[in-house]
Amino acid sequence: MLVIRDLGELVAERGTDRCDIGGAKPRTILAVLCAHAGHPVSAATLIAEVWGPDAPERTQRALESQIWRLRKALSPRGEASVIVTDRAGYRLDLSAATVDSVDFDSAASAVLDESGTATIDDLDDVLRRWRGEPFTTAISTPTVDQARRRLISVRAAVLARRADLLLAAGEADRALGEAQALITLDPLDEHAWSVKIAALAAGGQRAEALTAYRDIRELLATELGVEPGAQVRAAQLHVLDDHSRAVRRVRLPSQHTSFVGRETELSMVVGLLDAERAVAITGIPGVGATRLAIEAARRAADSFDDGVWYIGLRGDADVATTITETMRIQPSAAAGTALDQVCNHLSAMSVLLVLDRVSESELGRDGLVDKDIDTILRRCAAVTVLAVGVPSGVDGEHVVTVHPLPTEAPGDTMPPAHRLLVDRIRSATGQFDVGADDRGDLDRICRAMGGLPLGLELAAARTVTFSIGEVADQLDTAVPEPVTRAFALAFDAMDDDLFDRFTRLTALRNPFTAVLAEAVCDSPSIADDLSELARRSLLWRIRGTRYRPTRFTIPHSVADHARAKHPDKSAAASQARDAAIVELLAATPMRITAHSARDLARVDDDHSSVMAFLESVVIDPVLLDSHIDLLERLGAYWFFRRRLADGIRVLRLASATVANGACTPRTSAMVALALGSALAFSQNTDEAHQHLTAYTPEELESLIVPGDRDPDTHTVRLALASLAAWTGDDHAVAADYAEWAATTIEGRDVDTAPTVIAAQALCAVIAGDIAQALDTAHTALALGTERGDPLATYLAAVMLGIAALVSGDTRMGLRWNDQAFRSYLECGGVQICDSMEQRGNHLSAAGEIGRAGRAFAVSRRYAVDAGLEWPRSPFTRDSLRTCRETDPTEFENGWHAGWGDAGDALSTNDHQAFSGM
């Protein structure tokens, strides 16, 4: 019997012999007959399809000639013709031939019937019949295109049913992969998006699930102008209703692909985390130790009341310092060292720390005991450490060694390496079901890569452009070191210009923006370059939101190999990075303006690379002298963007450099003032006082001002120091700096005046002159509004709001709170804890218990996220007690809603969501 394989390349076979169908026209005739298999197709229809609607009259004879040749090709030994003629036209006789598309359609209809009895295995059997897009070697015609679209739609329906069954069976990772493949095929497939949202949530990735909902909502609004349908909304509501994980902080890198191939190791590590306090995962670079650790930590998160934190340990950075920076532990005068600060912070917490040694230089540390980790485990009884890459060496540590994925499996079971490769091909191409002809190529690829996940990811990325067989041919199976081979293949596939730009990108610290990448590479086509590098799996994208642009991460091992390939280019790459950061900081005004939200966010988006630049500057006296003005510009940035810990760290390094005596007196004075301000903003008052009082006003003016390019810079410098001292409760110093700032603007009409007046108002409050303070605050508010100074209007509105709260005028208090909140966001601020807490106090006084509970919950969650003590206002405890006594149910409902809303806002940087709440 003739077998017509029309899924993929159009092929006809009799037994083991392949029929020579001929060129494009006979193939298209056969494709049209297959599309109507078993039903007649008129000669007029065939002529219009193959020759077009304007075919000449003699085309009838040409059609008859093509049919005659096609019949002979399909029945080369005189077998009965499979193309029969009747009064209605030509018909493909299904009693003499089988057609793949017909068999697929029939099998799909059987498993998609309304009985719902089909199993995952049944669906797998149907999908294995699919060899590829139908009729690929036929001419595109209306009938062929319609049939192709219908068959693709049928396959998508089968995939969707399989995704539903996988999700119902608890196989969230496979369901996620299936949904992503469907979305690749049709980005507007709402059912696929609903499965993706549910699968992410089922896998413990609640924030990612909500991000997926926002993605499809924005896509539907942009493309169709509609809101998501019932299925997508139901999936989102299910995620929002599950607050059990929302309360717990799970700070792990987002994963956008399913976890495949290490189920045994995953179960083992999760079990060890439940029973042991020190666990390590080791393996060669690219083996997937970090991914395994992240997945295990995510699944074990419910065992740790205070959450899970991922700590990336880079280079020679010590453990305690890195934990302090990552967890944003505020410096404390009582704890002398970073290790003491960490232990004090974690001593009463139940937390899992995933410590990932991301630098390959650390791989030689085996056998050494990490004293910081040992101390943390001894002093913090409920802390568990999961070390990745290198064991910590502490007593009792359980080490799990991860090997490349097996490329063989018993019986007909698909080996883990094959399963990972198939999953990644589906994600890359949107469609791939393993056929009998593919297994050999899959095995060749897996063996060439030695089962190494990184190599398999790179191979899968190539299938977007090449067939499986071509990829297998490209990867020579006699490769002794698959990691080196995988990197070499990736780098060799780039032209010299692209590789040069990629090498420049490796000087950036993850994550980085496309804007900084363009500046470093000096390439207007950087967007295309980043897309191409992402396609090659050489960098990963961090999806952008409305409030933060898309950013990119280059795996450290990939970057290390690129730099090793051309070490001479590394220095040039670092110089290009530094030049780009200098330009970025030079465009960031020191004074808070109406554009500060944009300016500070731009620095924050590339914070890691900014820190890399500053870390290289502050340890070199010559560089510190030349860049001290840029460093000083970041004073407001450290405070408003919750970066005080980083600011204090680099300023301490600068202070140590200054102490060696190699810097100019101007630099010494500016570092002292900047460090004192940062310490005061972080309420490290005693140490801040030492730096803020190290120089007299006359000394500051004589040492610093001659080097200022803008005469108003010194006014801003003094005003910010006053605000910092006031925040740190060093009120006498705050008053001194406010007075000094005022002397610099006497007799001058300058834009810095509103901030200076606001600082004077704050100091007047502390001095007890309330009437004068309020009068000055009104002046600062009016002038700040006129001059576009959001810092002045923020400070004035806060003061006036507190006054309204004390006087019992809740209506005015809420109005001032709204003004303060808006102005704070205009300053570029992202820590809305204080504004929301004060709003809760106003709402409580107004008797709006539910709204007060919501505001207090938002404030509390922001405080927890920043590691701040809460409550922060002296009014709050009484307000909380009043709310709970007045209407405990309403208060708890509001608190529950606010806690979830704050978690969503923190994950998306949507702090504006609470404006006017």
Image: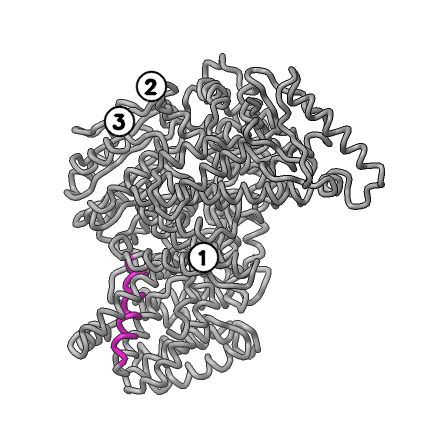
Residue 253 sits in quarter: top left
Q: Residues within 10 Å of mark 3 (few under 14, many from 20)?
A: some
Indicate the secondary structure of the residue bearing disc 1. helix
Amino acid on which the number 1 mark rests in the picture: Arg
Which residue is denoted by mark 2 in the rendering?
A: 411
Residue most extreme to the front: 87
Nearer-the-camera pick, 652 or 276: 276
Is 301 positioned to the left or the right of 89 in the image?
Answer: left
The residue that label 3 is drawn on is: 400
Residue drawn 26% across the image and 71% down it: 853
Q: Which residues are magenta?
A: 848-864
Q: CA distance from mark 2 to mark 1?
A: 44 Å
| Label annotation for residue 129 | none
Q: Is residue 653 visible?
A: yes
Q: Position of residue 116 (x, y in %)?
A: 35, 45
* Residue named by callout 1: 214
Regarding residue 706, the answer to whether it shows in the image is: no
